[in-house]
Image (cartoon, rainbow, N blue to C red):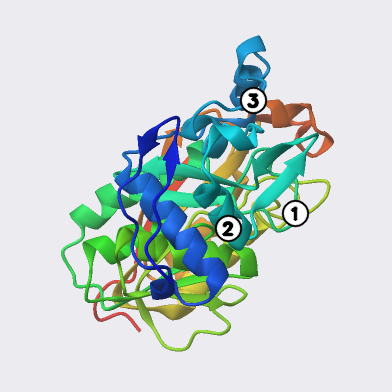
Amino acid sequence: MSATIISIDGHRLDQAPPLGIAGDERRAALYALGCGLKQHGYVFTTVTPLTHSRVNARLANGWAHDLAGIFGWSRPFKPAVVNSTLIELLHQGEVLNHDNGMLRSVLRASTLDGQLYLHSAYPTNASDAVFFGPDTYRFVRALRASLAARSLPVRRAADIGCGAGPGAITIALAHPDASVFAVDINPAALVLADVNARIAGVTNVVPTNSNLLSQVEGQFDLIVANPPYLIDREQRAYRHGGGDLGAALSVAIVDEAIKRLAPGGTLMLYTGAAIVASADPFRQAVEPRLRAAGFHWTYDEIDPDVFGEELDEAPYAYADRIAAVWLCATRPIGAA
């Protein structure tokens, strides 16, 4: 197929790469869409659902007038707002819905550190939604800082629960010679992680369907994760962390890293910890595990108070707050 040009409100997007480069037609269309937005200079920061709903509720924001309205704020738009090529890309990408005579994209596009990520549109209600939000920004910035501080080489890395792929792509950009496994149990996430990696121009990301690392063999120099850590009544995979306070999956990732990290290998984990009576049950669960395995580790609160609205839910009836935390744990060289 020929290269694609997208325009909106009279502004022309630069020529996108050939559609055939991304493989099947759906991924090719999403790839062309993302590249076109990126070349156009599209910028959008995804906010919390509460902020998103408040902004969209304003009288002037009932429908989209520009790219940010369509792909950032997830507003319905009139077909006349964009040209037929853009609508065709959305159709080929299977991400176009009809909404009371208007159209709506079921994907959003967010930007972070100069990269563009396609992910699920607001509101993220579906069981297979691909999350991207304020936590993603905190995760990637903490990851970047920890990667810069690491002096040992990275040959094999894994991003557990990769979602749209920002962790894997950040590693791939920093270590272009490494094999980076973008691991998720959600097929929709793996499609977007693959497309987003191609948009970023990295070729060393390997999307892999796996529960933790069960479908990936060998040891790793680096394991990163930004897992769900809340108790979700519907137990949606992108949001539900399991256990009494949402920490079960995060604890399982620590256990997996202890088994699979090579000497000198590091786990970089961004998660949430419910604080109860000034104690941190997640930290209390992982400390003895790391100590018994001989790991060196640091544990920091990145944000002391996130998702405060969850404290109204029954599972958090006795919690003081939910903190965003960063665990960086390394198996010493020479350790078994």
Categorize mark 2 by other alpha carbons within 10 Å: few (<14), some (14-19), many (20+): many
Work out whether mark 2 precedes mark 1 in sequence or the reverse, and give the earlier one: 1
Q: 202 or 178: which is nearer to us? A: 202
| x and y, in percent, of residue 135 in the image | 50, 41
Query: What is the secondary structure assignment of the residue under circle 3?
Result: loop
Q: How many marks?
A: 3
Which of the 4 image quarters holds residue 2? bottom left
Categorize mark 1 by other alpha carbons within 10 Å: few (<14), some (14-19), many (20+): some
Report how far apart the C-alphas of labels 2 and 3 lie in the structure: 39 Å
Query: What is the secondary structure assignment of the residue under circle 1?
Result: loop
- What number is the disc on residue 63? 3
Residue type pointed to by label 3:
Trp
Q: Which residue is mark 1?
A: 236
Query: What is the secondary structure assignment of the residue under circle 2?
Result: helix
Q: Is residue 271 left or right of residue 32?
A: right
Which of the 4 image quarters holds residue 138? top left
Q: Is residue 52 left or right of residue 86?
A: right
The answer to whether residue 186 of the structure is visible from this angle is no
Report how far apart the C-alphas of labels 2 and 1 lie in the structure: 16 Å
